[in-house]
Amino acid sequence: MKARGTVMARRAAYAATVSDWRSLKAGDQVEILKHAQLLAAGDVEEVSASGNVLWLVPGAQSEATSFLKSDGVQVRRS
């Protein structure tokens, strides 16, 4: 059985902000934050080759929404 500290540390690391958006894969569940406020949540549809643009399919809508890294948004796995 794993120690509670190890499990909690892995959870915290998994929920940490993703700095390199290129590491995200289609289907990953993420949250989009700006100024510590949740803007959107859903599944990654695609990430640009440069890693500066992310397309997200929100749970309630069928159209993908794009987010730009230059807009100051943060991505966190959920």
Image (cartoon, rainbow, N blue to C red):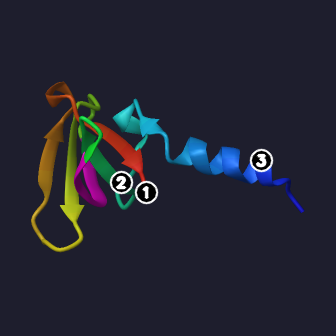
Q: For the residue labelled by badge 2, is the local secondary structure a helix, a strand or a loop?
A: strand
Q: For the residue labelled by badge 1, is the local secondary structure a helix, a strand or a loop?
A: loop
Single out the mark in the foreground, 3 or 2.
Answer: 3
Question: What amino acid type is highlighted by mark number 3?
Answer: Thr
What stretch of residues is rendered in magenta?
38-47
The residue singled out by tag 3 in the image is 6
In the figure, is residue 11 to the left or right of 31? right
Q: Are marks 1 and 2 in contact (CB under 8 Å)?
A: yes
Q: Is residue 19 magenta?
A: no
On-image quarter of the C terminus: bottom left
The residue singled out by tag 1 in the image is 78
Q: Main secondary structure of the magenta part?
A: strand
In the figure, is residue 4 to the left or right of 63? right
Instruction: Identify the residue at image location x=85%, y=53%.
Output: 3
Question: What amino acid type is highlighted by mark number 2?
Answer: Val
How many angstroms separate mark 3 from mark 2 (CA)? 23 Å
- 42 above or below 18? below
Q: For the residue labelled by badge 3, is the local secondary structure a helix, a strand or a loop?
A: helix
Name which of mark 3 and mark 2 comes first in the sequence. Answer: 3
Q: Position of residue 43 (x, y in %)?
A: 31, 61
On-image quarter of the N terminus: bottom right
- 55 above or below 21? below
Name which of mark 1 and mark 2 comes first in the sequence. Answer: 2
Q: Position of residue 6 (x, y in %)?
A: 77, 47
Q: Position of residue 4 (x, y in %)?
A: 79, 54
Question: Mark on residue 30?
Answer: 2
In the figure, is residue 39 to the left or right of 44? left
How many angstroms separate mark 1 from mark 3 (CA)? 19 Å
Relative depth, front residue between 68 and 49: 68
Q: Is residue 39 magenta?
A: yes
Relative depth, front residue between 75 and 63: 75
